[in-house]
C-alpha cells in the first residue's frame, strides 16, 4: 500500500496580503515537501485554507471600514490568487467561514464537554458602555501594569515585553474610541488543558522534532492552565446551545479544526464524502503540519489536547516543521510601513523559479533569515545561471552543434566516469534525505553541488578537444551521455523547488512524460533514449543585470520615504494673515456619517458662544462615537460652504502626513477658547 501523507500549512488569516516572509517560512517549504513526496509516489493530500474568524479579523475589518464578511472575502480571494502565482500546489484551499466548518467545531466542543473537559465560569470582562459591548484584548489599550508604559496592548506591552490579561491594565480604554472601560461579568467556557498534561507529556516524549520546538513545548506543558475557548462576539462559530447568544468560539479553538473541515470539503468536492477519514481517522497516515514559530503551542499542545478529548480518534500531528522568521533587508516585512516587495511587480520582472529557489536556499530553518536583493542577485547569477543554467546550456548546445542534436550513445565507462556517476547518485540520495528532514537549504546546496560537479566533469573531459579526433567519437558520445545523465539528476532533484524549470529541462532531455508523472526513483533508473532527436534548448534562466538590482533597492527605499514625504513649506505671510484667522476650541456634541462609504462626517460643535455644523473628512480615522465629547480646533471665521448639500460653517484642523490624520489634543481647554 502506498504511504499516505497529510500535509497542512498554517491557515493564514484572511486579513492582509501574504508576503515573501510567510512564503519562505511556511508555504514554500510545505509545497516543496508536498511536491517531493508526490514525486516519490506517495499518496499526498496537501491542505490549507483561510483563517477567517477572530478578533484579528474583526479589528482589521473595522479599521478598513468593511464588514468582517466583506473583509475576509476580499483577502481570501487575494491570497488564493497569490498562492496560485507562487505555484503552491494545494490539493484544496478552504476557508473557515464555509458552512461545513461549523458542525465539526461544535462536535469537537460537545465531545470535550461530555468527557468533562469543559467548565463554565463567570468572569469579569472589560466592557465599553459607549460601544455597548465587551471588548476583546486586541481592542483594548491602557497603561502597562509592569512598566507603566501608557500605550500597552491588551495582551502584551511593547515597551517591556510583559504578558498579562487585559483586565490587569491600568486605565483600560477602547482602542477604537478611546473611551474608558469597566469590568462586567460575562459567562465563558473553559477548556481544562491541565487535565491533559500527562498524556501530552507521554506523547511528546517520543517526538524527534527540532530542538527549539521540543524545548519550548516541554517547558510549556509543565504549566498548563484552563483557558477560555469562547469569546463575546458575533463573528465566529456559534456555540451549540441556546443561552449563549453573542458568544462564539475563540479563533484558536476553531481554526485548527479547520484542517479537518477543509479535508471534508475536499472530499465532498471530489465526490467521495468519506474520503477524509482515510487521512484523519487512520493511524497509518503521516500528518505533517508546517507552521511559523509563533504557532507552536497551538499545534504542539492545544490542538493535540483537543483531539485527545474526542470520542473519535483523529490523527495527532507526527511532524511539526516550525520555521523561524524571514525578514526583508534587515527589517520585518510590513505592509503598513511600506517595507515589502510587491509580488505582482516582482513576477513581472523576474522568474517565479528564481524566487522559489532563493527563498528555499535561504529558508529560516534554524534561525531567522532574510531576503536581500544582493543575495537574490548572487543566487540567480552565480548559482542558477553560473552553475546550473550554464551546465545545462553548454551540454545541450554542444549536442545540438556537434552531435546532430540527438541523445548520444553510451559506450564503455572509464574509472572517472564511474566516479562521476556515483558521486552524483550519492548526492541525489543525500538530497532525498534532506527533503525528508525538511532541510531545504541543504537540498538547494546539494543541487548546486551536483551542477558544479557536472561542470567540472565537462571541463576535465574537454569534449571540444575530442571533436578533432576521429578515433574519439565513441568517447565523446559517452561523455555527453553522462553529462545528460547528470542533467537528468538535476531535473529530478530540483523539481520540488523549481518545478517549471525542472520540467523544461526534462523536456530538453527528450522525455515526453513529465517528471512528476515519472517519479523520483523511476526517473533515476530511466535510461536516456539514445538517438532521440532533442528539442532545441533555451536558456533556463536569464542573467540579472546589476542595474536591475539597484533599481529594486531604490524602489524599496523610495517606498519608505513616501511615507515621510512631507509637504514643502508654503510662502511667508505677514502677521496680518495670522490675525485674520479666528481659531477656536470647540466641543463635538453630535457626529454622524454622511453616507456609509464617504470619508465625511457631519459634526455638530459647540463654540461656547454658539453651536455650528461642520463637515469634515476624517471618517476613515475617527468613528462618530469616538468624537462625541472631544475637543477640536476649528477655523471659526471661514465662509460657509456647501458640502454634499450640507452647509459647513467652519473647518476642523487636523494633523496629517498625507496618509494618517489625527486631531490635535486640547482636551483640558473649555469650548470657545481662542488659539493665538
Ligand atoms: N491564522 C494563524 C496565523 O496566521 C494560523 C492558524 S493555523 C490553524 O498565525 F491551526 F489555526 F489553523
Ligand atoms: Zn510594560
Image: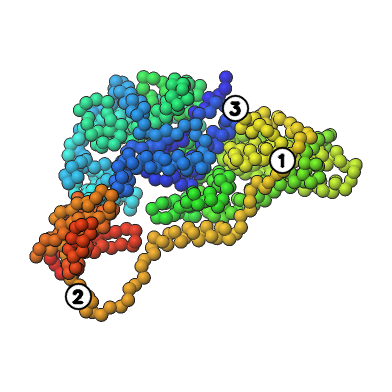
Q: For this rendering, which residue is in front, 573 or 546?
A: 573
Image quadrant holding the N terminus, namely top right
Image quadrant holding the C terminus, namely bottom left
Tell me: 44 left or right of 659: right
- Residue visible at 34% across and 42% down in the picture: 71
Looking at the image, is mark 3 or mark 2 earlier in the sequence?
A: 3
Residue 382 position, x and y percent, is 64, 52
The residue sitting at the left extreme is 609
The residue sitting at the front extreme is 645
Labels 2 and 1 touching (C-beta < 8 A): no
Tell me: 509 left or right of 562: right
- Does residue 43 lie above or below 128 as drawn? above
Label 2: which residue? 580
User: How many residues crowd around disc 2 within 10 Å: few (fewer than 14), some, or many (20 or more)?
Assistant: few
For marks 3 and 2, give the CA distance: 81 Å
Tell me: 340 left or right of 482: left
Residue 643 position, x and y percent, is 23, 59
- Residue visible at 44% across and 45% down in the picture: 18
Q: Residue 106's quadrant in the figure? A: top left
Q: Report the coloring of the rendering.
A: rainbow
- Does residue 355 lie above or below 566 as drawn? above
Label 1: which residue? 535
- State which mark lies toward you, 3 or 2: 2
Looking at the rendered structure, the secondary structure element under dot 2 is helix
Label 3: which residue? 41
- State which mark lies toward you, 1 or 3: 1
For marks 1 and 3, give the CA distance: 28 Å
Amino acid at each position: 500500500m502506498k504511504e499516505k501523507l497529510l500535509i497542512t500549512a498554517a491557515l493564514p488569516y484572511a486579513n492582509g496580503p501574504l508576503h515573501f516572509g510567510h512564503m519562505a517560512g511556511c508555504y514554500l517549504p510545505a509545497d516543496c515537501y508536498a511536491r517531493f513526496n508526490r514525486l516519490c509516489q506517495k499518496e499526498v493530500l496537501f491542505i490549507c485554507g483561510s483563517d477567517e474568524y477572530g478578533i484579528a479579523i474583526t479589528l482589521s475589518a473595522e479599521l478598513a471600514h468593511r464588514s468582517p464578511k466583506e473583509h475576509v472575502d476580499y483577502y481570501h480571494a487575494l491570497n488564493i490568487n497569490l498562492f496560485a502565482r507562487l505555484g503552491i500546489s494545494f490539493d484544496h484551499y478552504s476557508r473557515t467561514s464555509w458552512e461545513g466548518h461549523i458542525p465539526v467545531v461544535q462536535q469537537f466542543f460537545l465531545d470535550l464537554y461530555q468527557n468533562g473537559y469543559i467548565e463554565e465560569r463567570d468572569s469579569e470582562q472589560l466592557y465599553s458602555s459607549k460601544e455597548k459591548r465587551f471588548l476583546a484584548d486586541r481592542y483594548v489599550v491602557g497603561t502597562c501594569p509592569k512598566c507603566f508604559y501608557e500605550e500597552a496592548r491588551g495582551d502584551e506591552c511593547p515597551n517591556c515585553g510583559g504578558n498579562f490579561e487585559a483586565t490587569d491594565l491600568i486605565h483600560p480604554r477602547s482602542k477604537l474610541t478611546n473611551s474608558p472601560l469597566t469590568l462586567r461579568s460575562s459567562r465563558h467556557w473553559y477548556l481544562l488543558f491541565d487535565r491533559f498534561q500527562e498524556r501530552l507529556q507521554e506523547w511528546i516524549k517520543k517526538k524527534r522534532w527540532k530542538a527549539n520546538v521540543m524545548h519550548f513545548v516541554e517547558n510549556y506543558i509543565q504549566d498548563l492552565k484552563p483557558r477560555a475557548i469562547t469569546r463575546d462576539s458575533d463573528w465566529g462559530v456559534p456555540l451549540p446551545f441556546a443561552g449563549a447568544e453573542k458568544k462564539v468560539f475563540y479563533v484558536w479553538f476553531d481554526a485548527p479544526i479547520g484542517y479537518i473541515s477543509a479535508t471534508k470539503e475536499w472530499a465532498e468536492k471530489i465526490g467521495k464524502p468519506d474520503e477524509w477519514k482515510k487521512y484523519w481517522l487512520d493511524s497509518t497516515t503521516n500528518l505533517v503540519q508546517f507552521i511559523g514559530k509563533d504557532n507552536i503551542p497551538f499545534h504542539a499542545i492545544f490542538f493535540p489536547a483537543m483531539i485527545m478529548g474526542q470520542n473519535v480518534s483523529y490523527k495527532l500531528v507526527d511532524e511539526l516543521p516550525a520555521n523561524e522568521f524571514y525578514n526583508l533587508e534587515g527589517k520585518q516585512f510590513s505592509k503598513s510601513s511600506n517595507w515589502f516587495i510587491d509580488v505582482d511587480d516582482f513576477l513581472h520582472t523576474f522568474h517565479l523559479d528564481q524566487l522559489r529557489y532563493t527563498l528555499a536556499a535561504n529558508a529560516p530553518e534554524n534561525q531567522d533569515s532574510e531576503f536581500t536583493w544582493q543575495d537574490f542577485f548572487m543566487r540567480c547569477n552565480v548559482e542558477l545561471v553560473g552553475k546550473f543554467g550554464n551546465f545545462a546550456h553548454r551540454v545541450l548546445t554542444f549536442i545540438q552543434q556537434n552531435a546532430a542534436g540527438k541523445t548520444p550513445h553510451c559506450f564503455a565507462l572509464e574509472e572517472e566516469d564511474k566516479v562521476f556517476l556515483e558521486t552524483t547518485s550519492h548526492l541525489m540520495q543525500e538530497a532525498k534525505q534532506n527533503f525528508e528532514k525538511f532541510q531545504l537549504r541543504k537540498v538547494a546546496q546539494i543541487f548546486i553541488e551536483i551542477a558544479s560537479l557536472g561542470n567540472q566533469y565537462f571541463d576535465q573531459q574537454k569534449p571540444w578537444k575530442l571533436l578533432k579526433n576521429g578515433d574519439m567519437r565513441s568517447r565523446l558520445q559517452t561523455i555527453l551521455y553522462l553529462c545528460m545523465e547528470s542533467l537528468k539528476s538535476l531535473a529530478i532533484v530540483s523539481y520540488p523547488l523549481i518545478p517549471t524549470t525542472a520540467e523544461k529541462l526534462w523536456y530538453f532531455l527528450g522525455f515526453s512524460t513529465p517528471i512528476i508523472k515519472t517519479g523520483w526513483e523511476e526517473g533515476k533508473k530511466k535510461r536516456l533514449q539514445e538517438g532521440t532527436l532533442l528539442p532545441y534548448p533555451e536558456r533556463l534562466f536569464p542573467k540579472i543585470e546589476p542595474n536591475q538590482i539597484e533599481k529594486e533597492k531604490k524602489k524599496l527605499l523610495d517606498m519608505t520615504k513616501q511615507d515621510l514625504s512631507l509637504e514643502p513649506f508654503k510662502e511667508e505671510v505677514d502677521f496680518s494673515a495670522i490675525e485674520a484667522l479666528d481659531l477656536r476650541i470647540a466641543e463635538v456634541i453630535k457626529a454622524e456619517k454622511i453616507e456609509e462609504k464617504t470619508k465625511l462626517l457631519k459634526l455638530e460643535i459647540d463654540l461656547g458662544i454658539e453651536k455650528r455644523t461642520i463637515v469634515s473628512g476624517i471618517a476613515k480615522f475617527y468613528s462618530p462615537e469616538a468624537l462625541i465629547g472631544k475637543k477640536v480646533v476649528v477655523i471659526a471665521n471661514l465662509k460657509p460652504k456647501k458640502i454634499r448639500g450640507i452647509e459647513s460653517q467652519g473647518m476642523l484642523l487636523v494633523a496629517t502626513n498625507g496618509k494618517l490624520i489625527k486631531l490635535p489634543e486640547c482636551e483640558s481647554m473649555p469650548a470657545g477658547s481662542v488659539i493665538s
